[in-house]
Image: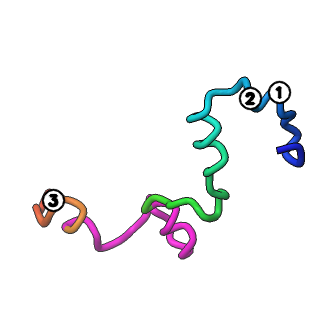
Amino acid sequence: MINLHVMPEEYEQQDYYLMLEVMSAQAKEDRPQGVSGYLKTLGIDPNNVQGTEGRLTNGENNQ
């Protein structure tokens, strides 16, 4: 904890469950991402996806 600049006295005063949550946090690149983030990693603009209109509305034709 000292390497993370948290003194033992300060650590002992914190909420146990909050500290567990903080210590188990994943790095940003290891966190799950949403569909928009995944499309961006593939180089696809999520706001300009062609041909998915029917699938995005459960097959209903809304044209």
Q: Nearer the viewer, residue 28 or 36?
A: 28
Q: Are marks 1 and 2 in contact (CB under 8 Å)?
A: yes
User: Disc 1 to disc 3, how far (Cα)?
Assistant: 64 Å
Residue 26 pos. (x, y %): 62, 56
Q: Give the class, few, some or many, for how many residues have Cα within 10 Å of label 2's Cα (few <14, many ≥20).
A: few
Residue 25 pos. (x, y %): 62, 51
Q: Are marks 2 and 3 in contact (CB under 8 Å)?
A: no
Q: Nearer the viewer, residue 16 or 47?
A: 16
**Within the magenta stretch, is there residue 12?**
no
Q: Give the class, few, some or many, for how many residues have Cα within 10 Å of label 3's Cα (few <14, many ≥20).
A: few
User: Disc 2 to disc 3, how far (Cα)?
Assistant: 61 Å
Residues rendered magenta in the picture: 36-54
Of the two numbered discs 2 and 3 in the rendering, the one whose residue sits closer to the viewer: 2
Residue that badge 3 annotates: 63
Question: Mark 2 or mark 3, which has the lower sequence index?
Answer: 2
Helix, strand or loop at label 2? It is helix
User: Which residue shows up at 15% across the image and 62% down it?
Assistant: 58
Name the side, left or right, on which 15 lies relative to 48: right
Q: Which of the numbered marks, if any, corresponds to residue 9?
A: 1
Q: Which of the numbered marks, if any, corresponds to residue 46?
A: none
Residue that badge 2 annotates: 12
Going by the numbered disc 2, the residue's amino acid type is Glu
Of the two numbered discs 1 and 3 in the rendering, the one whose residue sits closer to the viewer: 1
Residue 51 pos. (x, y %): 29, 73
